[in-house]
Image (cartoon, rainbow, N blue to C red):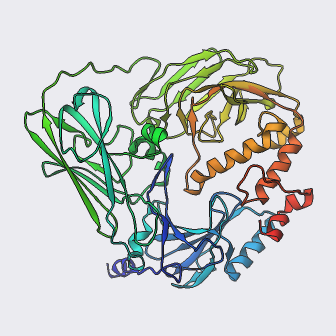
Amino acid sequence: MLASLLLAAIAYVSPVHYPIELAGNFGEPRPNHFHAGIDVKTDRMTGKPLYAMADGFISKVSVGTHGFGKAVYVRHPDGNTSVYVHLDDFAPQIEAAVKRYQYAHKVYATDITFPATMMPVHKGQFIGFSGNTGSSQGPHLHLELHRTQTGDLLDPLAYLKGYIRDTIAPAVYAFKAYPVPGEGTFQHGSSPRVFTFDKGHFSAWGKVGFGVRTMDHMNGVYNSFGSRLIRLYCDGRLVFSADINGLPQSMHRMMNSWGDYDHFMQSRVWFLKSFVEPGNRLPFLKTGQGKGYILFNERREYRLRYVVSDVFGNQTVREFTVLGTPEALGPRPVITGPEALLTSRDNHWQTDGIRLDVPGRLMAVDRLMKPQLLASARGLSQAVRFIPGNVPLLGWADLAFRIPDATIDPRKLYVAMTGTGTPPRYCRSEAKNGWVYGKPRSTVSLCSSSNRRTRPSWSATSAGHLWEDTRRSDNCASRHGTSAATVKRLKPLLITNRYENEKATAAGCSTGAQFGCQDVSLHRLHRGQGSHYRRFRALHVQCRRLRHVHQTLPLCGRQARQGRYARDHRL
């Protein structure tokens, strides 16, 4: 007992030796993920010394050209691990160990784990320099705190409150009402609508959920942040609370369920729901038996109150009154049948040559598909469009196309996304047992693999097909297995997609995709593109700070393979 109390009393210190200012805080809502740490400003420059926040040992070091870039993991005796991300360089002893490993294994990008006795560190010990490596969009320190055993993400601000000044309460701008279809109305309507708190009095009947738009601010910086604690009361009774902490890394995609994803895609503004959808399993969302919905079933006034606060205790209160007013309710929508995607079952849909499998755990709410088979001018299969609107899934689905011709080399087939007036967009694909499974590469397209499952969300602006590459060499196909539609489109396509995806990758989650946002079909890869793709991969490895599609650099094969160009020229 005494030992556990001592461990719990471990104090953390600032990772920098200057006043901390933040560019981003923990748990900020973002498409497909939460922000997994805090972003510490470094005066728009690299090379700021960084220090261990507590005693422990260096358990892991990562080196990469995307995602975290260079990162140091320090394991502490209280059960936490602090992670210092986007570093420019490591401390000398760490750098020496990394280089030994890289030369011994002939790799540049790598993850290296160390035993507890190899590199112990003390609180405040120098561990490296801040940088802009990986998927960083500008010089800063991305700092994360994990529970060592589970990997759950913790809010570092809870351990660093003494080093940051914040006396500004969160801003609460508006709320949104979500009447349950066929079961509730709000302000004489059954559609979700946004309201301000100024009016003060509203009318409702039946079951209604609510959401709130809120942002936090801090002293001395212009940035906007996510709010840590959101509570909704009805007549003094706590109906819903969200304390954003202890986030399992496998649940990043559930941000699309807690936040109003459709509203964000239209306005770039998040409304955070004060109710829990059936498929949302975020552990920090707390409700009673009503799952956060409020039942207005009496002719009386209901007093609702939002209380939004930050980790420093600053809080804002917004109140409004709802008068229970009986109204006729519309019919309840019925979602059933083979084209229904239900949370209560594993969903399977198949037509001639196309197969879709969506486990129920991937759905936040029940949805009804409206599959459309479309003609494909250049694809080898029909195009299929699954569902109107954007419907984010919570994990990997399975989508496959049957190979239409046994004489076609399956290594030259891939699933592509196409839209009106747009070229086919490649999904990394795998041929298996007469079928081709695709894997998406951006957050605006989808296909999936039976082995490497995609994280899709769906819409209906375009369609996908099966395509074939008639010009790509067999050798390149077997060596690389990934490609884009044509040589001319390859480089800008992959560079653009890479930086869209790595924002999510840097937060510790897979990139995901929009399922159905483009129509899906099977295509054939183009011969001759293999050497061009290899050259791009070298550029991808070396130019880790490339930020514009039109930027290119001359490379030679030896430099590309060994990664020396990037190291010597500090790109």
**x%, y% of residue 121?**
57, 83
Q: Whole-percent x and y of residue 50?
A: 58, 79
Looking at the picture, tell me which residue is in the foreground, 112 or 166. Answer: 166
Whole-percent x, y for residue 555 in the image: 89, 57
Q: Is residue 380 above or below residue 89?
A: above
Question: Which of the 4 image quarters holds residue 378?
Answer: top right
- Residue at (42% x, 17% y) in the render: 337
Q: Is residue 81 left or right of residue 67?
A: left
Q: 558 or 402: which is nearer to us?
A: 558
Q: Is residue 497 left or right of residue 369?
A: right
**In front: 434, or 374?**
374
* Quarter of the figure with residue 206: top left
Q: Residue at x 48, y 80 (%)?
A: 19
- Quadrant where the N terminus sits is bottom left
In this figure, what is the number of numbered marks?
Answer: 0
Q: Is residue 484 above or below residue 120?
A: above
Is residue 568 visible in the rendered image? The answer is yes
Would residue 147 be visible to someone looking at this image? no
